[in-house]
Amino acid sequence: MTWVITAKTRFYLHDDETLLAGLLRTGHNVNFQCKAGYCGSCRLRLTSACRHPITYAKPPLAMVEDNEILPCCCQVKGVIHLKNIS
Ligand code: FES
């Protein structure tokens, strides 16, 4: 089970739910367009409290820094802390 902690709330992801889908389901305001790792518009920052590695089934085409993720296509485990999202 993956727990997601934001400034607004905390929630868990359903099986096979993307992080983007979970954020939208719980009323977070997240930009997105392609939902496939191409455009980068869903890019979010992690806090330093995240200890589990973020992985991608396929490397995304959009550029991401070490502390950034693409919630439309990343694979998360454990507990994930997100910055600057409400
Ligand atoms: S929505 Fe395009 S990279 Fe996530």
Image: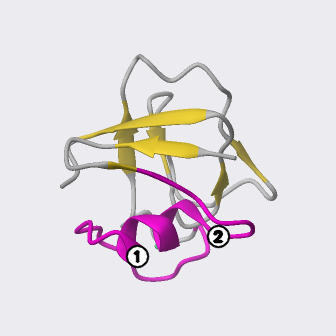
Q: Residues within 10 Å of mark 2 (few under 14, many from 20)?
A: few
Mark identifier at residue 12? none
Badge 1 amino acid: Arg
Q: Does the residue tagged 1 have its C-beta within 8 Å of any atom of ligand 1?
A: no
Q: Residues within 10 Å of mark 1 (few under 14, many from 20)?
A: few
Q: Which residue is mark 1?
A: 25
Judged from the image, the secondary structure of the residue bearing numbered disc 1 is helix
Picture residue at 44% right of the left edge, 39% below the top: 68
Question: Is 63 on the left-hand or right-hand side of 81?
Answer: right
**Nearest to the observer: residue 36 or residue 85:** 85
Name which quarter of the figure residue 29 lies in: bottom left
Most extreme residue toward the bottom, as rendered?
Answer: 33
Residue type, mark 2 in image? Glu
Distance in Å between CA atoms under marks 2 and 1: 10 Å
State yes or no: residue 60 in magenta.
no
Between discs 2 and 1, the one toward the N terminus: 2
Residue tagged 2:
17
Q: Position of residue 75 (x, y in %)?
A: 69, 51
Q: Given contact means CB atoms under 8 Å apart, are the residues at marks 2 and 1 in contact?
A: yes
Front residue of this view, candidates 32 and 85: 85
Quadrant the C terminus occupies: bottom left
Please tell me whether residue 54 is drawn above or below residue 73 in the rendered image: above
Element carrying mark 2: loop
Q: Is residue 77 above or below residue 52?
A: below
